[in-house]
């Protein structure tokens, strides 16, 4: 088949890095460009693990260069900080009618412009496109819409793990009260620019909560579960580089059999969700697009634990899965990889 031409806009962050790793090995993809605002060096100078896999150099992001990339590629991945894609993407889509965009930022995840402004602190410059974007978590009722979409809003990492934990219960009508969620994440989730929150001495042998009940991924979670969902969400910074581990405490209607059946119906045929017999470990999913899910039930409470790689199922892995869907490929193409194990 004809190879898809794709470009990564923003390749010096961790999301762009992981996209490049996956796409360079994809059997049906030609990576034509990886852009940067600050560098024109070879990719392998910034990301040494890509040595021998590409001779591409970072290309600059002038308006003319972005228009040329939109015109010459099938799919663009927006791997920029929040706020950039909302300004760039609508014009690129209007200019190139056959182009499709997969956005890894939070710019198109929320449908309500006022909600976007409340959570991200700035008005959305393209509210019409905000409403047209399709939320890109295939396992949770979005697969057919993604296949038809021109603009896919890739989910947030915390949101991905939390929605995967709770969506089967919401889908089956089993949620019966306020849900508590504790989500633990690695430092790569905070991006490649050093800060006090990601600095190694601050995180090593340390664990702390941040943005309790006020994290920007919370409205994504509620939107995916339905308007009646009530979720208290507390993220934590952990002394690991990659990975997310979610524990959800969900009051439910029905007993253990109903809860188990809800998860079996939701995920048995999903290529990237594994229902596991014991609480999952992060190291089993690092480097993959997999989500390991465990559920147990006691006295009206479902306890669900989920492990994902924040750069895999929480970001670039799902983005490539979404690319496969919008391109008409088997969604697991290029992604069926085992975890590192250690």
Image (spheres, rainbow, N blue to C red):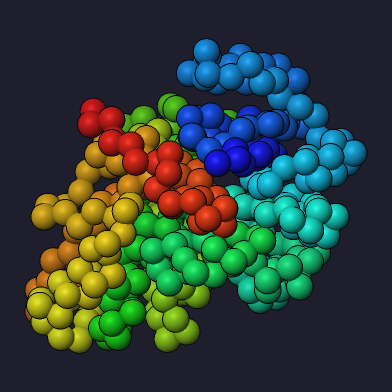
- Considering every residue shown, the one lying at the far right of the view is 64
Q: Position of residue 258 (x, y in %)?
A: 15, 80
Tally the numbered discs.
Answer: 0
Q: Residue at x 66, y 61 (%)?
A: 150
Left or right of 158? Residue 291 is: left
Quadrant where the N terminus is found in the figure: top right
Q: Is residue 83 visible?
A: no
Vertical relation: 280 (above or below) 172: above
**Residue 3: x percent and y percent?**
60, 38
Residue 139, image quadrant: bottom left
Residue drawn at 66 percent across, 39 percent down: 5
Residue 34 seen from this side: yes
Decide if residue 134 is on the left or right side of residue 233. right
- Examine the rendered structure and indicate whether residue 23 appears above or below residue 294: above
Give the percent coordinates (x, y) of residue 92: 80, 53
Residue at the front extreme? 1
Quarter of the image where the C terminus is located: top left
Residue at the image point whose x is 18% and y is 64% from the top = 295
Asked if residue 291 lies left or right of residue 4, the reply is left
Viewer-proximal residue, 193 or 91? 91
The x, y position of residue 307, in whole percent, is 29, 49
Residue shown at 33% from the left, 79% from the top: 170
Indicate the quadrant where residue 100 lies: bottom right
Q: Is residue 131 left or right of residue 279?
A: right
């Amino acid at each position: 088949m004809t190879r898809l031409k794709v470009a990564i806009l923003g390749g010096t962050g961790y999301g762009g890095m992981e996209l490049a790793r996956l796409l360079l090995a994809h059997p049906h993809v030609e990576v034509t460009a990886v852009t940067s605002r600050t560098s024109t060096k070879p990719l392998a100078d910034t990301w040494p693990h890509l040595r021998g896999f590409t001779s591409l150099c970072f290309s600059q992001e002038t308006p003319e260069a972005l228009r040329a990339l939109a015109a010459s590629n099938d799919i663009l991945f927006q791997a920029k900080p929040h706020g950039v894609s909302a300004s760039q993407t609508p014009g690129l889509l209007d200019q190139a009618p056959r182009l499709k965009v997969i956005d890894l930022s939070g710019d198109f995840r929320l449908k309500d412009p006022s909600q976007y402004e409340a959570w991200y602190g700035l008005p959305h410059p393209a509210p019409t496109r905000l409403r047209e974007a399709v939320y890109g978590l295939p396992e949770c009722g979005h697969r057919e819409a993604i296949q038809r979409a021109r603009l896919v809003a890739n989910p947030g990492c915390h949101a991905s793990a939390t929605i995967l934990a709770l969506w089967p219960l919401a889908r089956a009508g089993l949620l019966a009260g306020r849900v508590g969620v504790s989500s633990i994440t690695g430092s790569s989730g905070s991006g490649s620019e050093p800060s006090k929150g990601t600095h190694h001495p601050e995180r090593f042998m340390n664990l702390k909560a941040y943005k309790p009940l006020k994290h920007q991924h919370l409205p994504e979670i509620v939107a995916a579960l339905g308007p009646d969902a009530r979720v208290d969400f507390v993220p934590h910074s952990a002394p690991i580089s990659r990975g997310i581990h979610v524990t959800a405490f969900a009051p439910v209607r029905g007993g253990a059999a109903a809860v188990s059946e809800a998860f079996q119906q939701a995920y048995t045929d999903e290529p990237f969700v594994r229902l596991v017999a014991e609480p999952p470990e992060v190291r089993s999913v690092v480097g993959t697009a997999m989500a390991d899910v465990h559920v147990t039930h006691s006295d009206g409470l479902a306890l669900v634990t989920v492990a994902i790689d924040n750069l895999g199922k929480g970001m670039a892995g799902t983005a490539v899965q979404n690319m496969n869907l919008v391109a008409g490929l088997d969604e697991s193409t290029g992604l069926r990889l085992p975890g590192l194990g250690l």
